[in-house]
Amino acid sequence: MSRPPLAREKVLDAFEAILVDDGARAATMDATAKAAGVSKGGLLYHFGSKDALAEGLIERLLALVDDDVAGMASAPDGPVAHFLRTSIMDNDPLDRAILATSRLAQDGSTAAGDALRDIRERWAAAIRPVAPDGPALDLVMLVSDGLYFNNALAGGSIPGPVPRGDAMEALIALVERAVRS
């Protein structure tokens, strides 16, 4: 598959950044073109509407999740450990795409909400082979949610308790023992 044009990626990067930093209302076509350093015509060449921009962002998110799920499947220490370690935001492309898509969902985008539910199911499907019963899978998913949420708190005025190093490894071991039992 060939790489998308650089201008298209710059536009998506700009749209994503505006969504993350300022929210969906600020992510207008004009603001996106300006932030991307392209003309309005250049933006319209790649994305004819704000809905098309959102579709492009969601496609980007789903491709990043495909890569993440592949990483889970090939992780030497297994999908649970990989999933929990990567549940702590690192400001990487996947984190930014999730946040931007969340902003769209919060603004009422059905497509964004559907995409977020879809990625959760993709992660669950990758974990299900090692956590086949409902409560075990729920445990892994909810611990991941808690790590992500508490990491988000750390960025604001409320400190978020996010385990690192040995504490993270102990948490992973505890979850994996619970999943196996």
Image: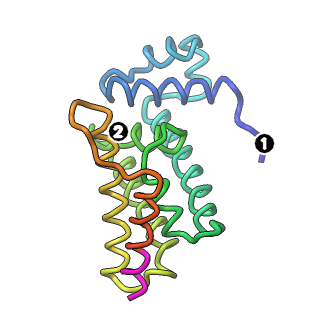
Q: Is residue 177 magenta?
A: yes
- The residue that label 2 is drawn on is 104
Say what amino acid the circle numbered 1 marks.
Ser
105 versus 87 height, above or below = above
56 versus 5 height, above or below = below
Alpha carbon of mark 1 to alpha carbon of mark 2: how far? 28 Å
**Seen in the image, is 94 located left or right of residue 157?**
right
Q: Where is residue 33 in the image (x, y as percent from the top left)?
A: 51, 16
Q: Position of residue 69 (x, y in %)?
A: 57, 62
Q: Which of 154 and 128 is in front in this view?
A: 154
Q: Residue at left 77%, top 48%?
A: 1
Upstream in sequence: badge 1 or badge 2: 1
Q: Residue at left 39%, top 54%?
A: 116
The number of numbered discs placed on residues in the rendered structure image is 2
Image-quadrant location for residue 152: top left
Q: Residue at left 58%, top 11%?
A: 39
Q: Position of residue 12 (x, y in %)?
A: 54, 30
Magenta stretch, residue numbers = 176-181
Say what amino acid the circle numbered 2 marks.
Leu
**Seen in the image, is 7 located left or right of residue 115?**
right
79 versus 103 height, above or below = below
Q: Does the magenta stretch include residue 26?
A: no
Q: Which of 46 and 91 is in front in this view?
A: 91
Disc assigned to residue 2 = 1
Is disc 2 surrounded by few (<14), some (14 to 19) or many (20+) residues within 10 Å? Answer: many
Image-quadrant location for residue 11: top right
Q: Position of residue 117 (x, y in %)?
A: 37, 59
Is disc 1 surrounded by few (<14), some (14 to 19) or many (20+) residues within 10 Å? Answer: few
Q: Which of the image's four quarters has the C terminus?
A: bottom left
